[in-house]
Amino acid sequence: MPTEVTAVVGACGPERQRYARMAAHQRGASVVPAQQIAASGSAVEEALDHLLRGPGTGRLVVEYPLHHPVLHIIGELTDADVPTELTDLVCLVDAAHLLTDLSSAEQLPLASDQDCGHSSVYASRAELIVTQIEYASLVVLVNTDSLRAHQLNRLLTLISCLAPKADIDMVDSSGHQARRRDRGSFTMEQTHAGWVSLLNGDFAPRFHDSAVTALRYEQMRPFHPGRLDDLMMRWREATAGGALLRSAGFCHLATRPHITGHWNQVGTHAALFPAAFDHQLSPEDEPLAFGQDLALIGVGFRAEQLIRELDDAALTDQELLGGPALWATFPDPFPEWRTADH
C-alpha cells in the first residue's frame, strides 16, 4: 500500500508548522518538519525514511519550506515510481499579509539549486506563494481575527479567483478549523489555477467582491515588443491605485511570429517564456492561442484602462499591413527564446 501524504505549504513558517502538527494529530499521521526537508536532497526519501524510523500508520504530513516549488512537490509525490499517494495539498495563507506578499519583489533561491551546492536559479517570493495557492486542494486562512467582514470577503474572493476549485477554510485564534469533506486522492484536475479556468471558460469562483476583478483578454494582433516592454515596465513601477496581482496566459510578439509565448506575472514580477514553436507542432496539435489570450486578476484596478493599455501595445493597422519584413525591424528587448518551456 502506498504511503498517504498530506503536503503542507505556505509562506509563514510558524503557522505552517503549527498547522502541520494539528493536521497530523487529527489524521493519526507522522510529521516530517520543513527543517528536515530543507536539509535533505529528496523530500520523498526523507519522508519515507522518517516513516521507517519509528512506529507509524502509513500516513504522513510533510511540511515544505517556501523555496520548494509546488509543481516539484506534486511531481515528486505523484511519481509512479515512488510509493506515495498525495491525498491533499494544503496551503496556509496569512490573511493579514497576503496582499503584501503578492506585491513583494524578494527573490528566493530554489531548493533544487541549494541541493546542488549553488544558488544560481531564483524565483520571486510572490510567484512561489501564488502558485502554492493555485495548485492547492485546500487553502487555509490564518490570522483572520483582525480583518473586518468586508476585508475578509475581499480576501476570500481573491483566493477564490486564484484557485476556484480549491476548498477554503479558516483557523481561528484558538486553532479551531471547520470540518471539511474528504476529497480522496489529489488530482491535477481538482486544482486548475484560476487563470487556466478563465481561459478554458469554466471559471466559477465561490466568493464575489466588487473590488476584485478577474477577466479574460483576447486580441488577435501580435504585440509590438518595444511597446509591450514599456507597458510591463510601467506596471512594475506603479505604486498607487489598483493592483494587477496575477496575469498569465499565451501571447505572440510580432518579431517572433512562429512562437507562442507563455505570459507569467505576479505582482512586480513579469516574464515571457517560449511555450510552443510552430514547426514542432504535429498536424493533430491545436495551437495554444491565436494572438493574445490572457487572464487578468487583481484588486481595485480599472479593467477598461488595462485593456486599452494592452490594445495600445498591439500592432497598429499600418504596422500589421507591413507584414513580417517590417516586424523584423522592431526593437525587441526580450531574451532570446531557444526551447519551449513545458
Image (spheres, rainbow, N blue to C red):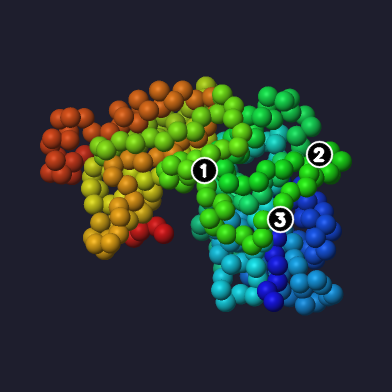
Q: List x then y, in percent, for residue 226.
A: 29, 36
Three-letter amino acid code at disc 3?
Answer: Asp
Q: Is residue 63 left or right of residue 29?
A: left
Q: Is residue 261 left or right of residue 66?
A: left
Q: Is residue 21 left or right of residue 150?
A: right
Residue drawn at 24 percent across, 62 percent down = 283
Q: Is residue 276 visible?
A: yes
For this rendering, which residue is in front, 272 or 216? 216
Three-letter amino acid code at disc 1?
Answer: Gly
Q: List x then y, in percent, for residue 82.
A: 61, 75
For this rendering, which residue is in front, 273 or 21? 21
Q: List x then y, in percent, for residue 93.
A: 68, 43
The image shows residue 172, relative to residue 65, as above or below, that is above
Sequence order check, earlier mark of 1 and 2: 2
Sequence order check, earlier mark of 1 and 3: 3
**3D distance between C-alphas at marks 1 and 2:** 26 Å
Residue bearing mark 2: 172
SS class, disc 1: helix
Residue bearing mark 1: 194
Q: Is residue 38 visible?
A: no
Residue drawn at 74 percent across, 28 percent down = 147
Residue drawn at 21 percent across, 39 percent down = 330
Specify few, some or many for label 3: CA neighbours under 10 Å numbering under 14, 14-19, or 20 or more. few
Residue bearing mark 3: 182
| Nearest-to-viewer mark from 2 and 3 | 3
Which quadrant of the figure has residue 279? bottom left
